[in-house]
Amino acid sequence: MADIPPNLDWIRAAPDDATGPGPWIELAFGDNDLVYIRETSDPTNIVTTTQKKWDAFVLGVQAGEFDHFVEGVEELEEEKS
């Protein structure tokens, strides 16, 4: 596993009005075009990727390429309410 720089500036990917511990995804952009990703509930488990791969992922999300992963989630949330 690559060494994780200790001085990363983590950005929480959550709605502006979100409160509490999440779980939320946090991102940090490091040197050499590296992107670090972690979950607030497990901050020592960090995934590393490249800026190019991260950009491709974000474009894929925007294009709806991953929508099939969340099919039915809204119905499950409504059942919990």
Image (cartoon, rainbow, N blue to C red):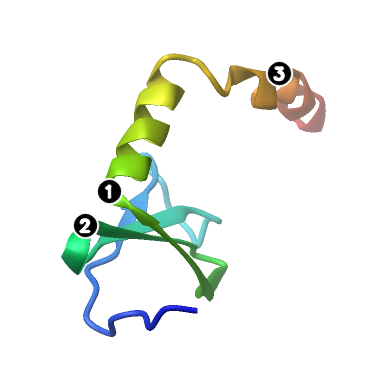
Residue drawn at the location 50% of the way across and 62% of the way down: 21
Relative height, residue 77 to residue 48 (above, below): above
Kind of residue at badge 1: Gln
1 or 3: mark nearer the eye:
1
The quadrant where residue 4 appears = bottom left
Q: Position of residue 59 (x, y in %)?
A: 35, 25
Q: CA distance from mark 3 to mark 2?
A: 33 Å
In the depicted view, which residue is nearer to us: 71 or 5? 5
Residue drawn at the location 52% of the way across and 55% of the way down: 22
The label shown at residue 33 is 2
The label shown at residue 80 is none
- Residue labelled with disc 3: 71
Q: CA distance from mark 1 to mark 2?
A: 5 Å
**Nearest to N terminus: mark 3 or mark 2:** 2
3 or 2: mark nearer the eye:
2
Q: Position of residue 79 (x, y in %)?
A: 82, 25
Q: Position of residue 39 (x, y in %)?
A: 51, 61
